[in-house]
Amino acid sequence: MSNRLKRVHDLLKKRLSDNHIESAGLEATLLIEHLTGLDRAAQILSFETDLSHDQILTLQALADRRLKGEPLDNIFGYREFFGRRFDVNKDVLSPRPETEMIIDFVLGHSSAADALTLLDLGTGSGAIAITILAERPNFRAVATDISHNALAMAKKNAEKHQTMDRVDFIESHWFRGVKPQVFDFVLSNPPYITDDYMTRLAPEVSGFDPDIALCGGADGLDAYKIITQHADKYLGANGFLCLEIGFDQGASVAKLLKEKGFKDVTVKQDLAGHDRMVIARSATKPPIHIKQSK
């Protein structure tokens, strides 16, 4: 029986599809890429190449894990985010493409020459803070997480992307362990799933993502209430508070911010047209108007 890559791909795709895996063809390609190092284009050029018996057995084992509901990120041990590979495991939420909106916002409101600071609350894998530091070589960051294991993963990613010398990791419940100081950006992708919806999550989410990174309380707003209560003490006069939100939370999070006196509260939509990010400016500090040189 042939072990040629094309046949193996087709059989794997069928097996995934028969077990109700969406995007079965893409996942088959990604599993083979993880095994062989061949991306999609290289696989097409190598369709007549035979895979070894050991490679077939390994691929079958990977497929078995996927069919038990384990996400590809966990199987691979990494996730691509903003063009970089971040290590992930069961202790951190894999960074999602929607979170790149936060990166785009910060990069759009700074330049490569700026020496600014950011606070990343609930850093998880460290993807937000580390990506910004990698893109902005003069930035410095403080990143907090309540999970010791999550911070260990974030530190590993910081070392991997050569930003460890510009970020301070703090084991802390939100702001609690952060020394009094002001930042140019206060950022967070906090847990926002309601208690009710937590009971209805897909098995590949509920069984593998950490609850602490998902559960936002009865109304999904527990973390936002804490952040809006304290953020202004850490936000500079020209600074921005930038929060990722659930698709139906734009109005409620904006209301929290306005009630605390935050200014210029704006809800941004993702590419699907869903509310995904809320931006605000300091509640108590007027912006500093810098005189432009002629």
Image: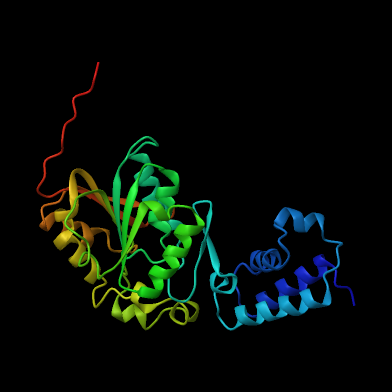
| Colour scheme employed for the rendering of this structure | rainbow
Residue 151 shown left or right of residue 207 in the figure: left
Instruction: Give the residue at x 71% y 67%.
Output: 32
Q: Nearer the viewer, residue 267 or 132?
A: 132
- The image quarter containing residue 210 is bottom left
Instruction: Give the residue at x 70% y 68%.
Output: 35
Where's residue 122, x and y in %? Answer: 32, 65
- Placement of 16 over or under 185, stated as above or below: below
- The image quarter containing residue 200 is bottom left
Instruction: Give the residue at x 28% y 73%.
Output: 216
Residue 20 shown left or right of residue 259 in the figure: right
Instruction: Give the residue at x 16% y 31%.
Output: 289
Q: Quadrant of the C terminus?
A: top left
Whether residue 270 is visible here, answered yes or no, is no
Whether residue 143 is visible here, answered yes or no, is yes
The image shows a total of numbered marks equal to: 0
Residue 166 shown left or right of residue 181 in the figure: right
Where's residue 234, x and y in %? Answer: 18, 54
- Placement of 64 over or under 185, stated as above or below: below
Where's residue 136, x and y in %? Answer: 40, 43
Where's residue 86, x and y in %? Answer: 51, 61
Seen as rendered, the residue at the extreme front is: 165
Q: Quadrant of the N terminus?
A: bottom right
Q: Nearer the viewer, residue 247 or 212?
A: 212
Q: Nearer the viewer, residue 244 or 138?
A: 138
Seen as rendered, the residue at the extreme right is: 1
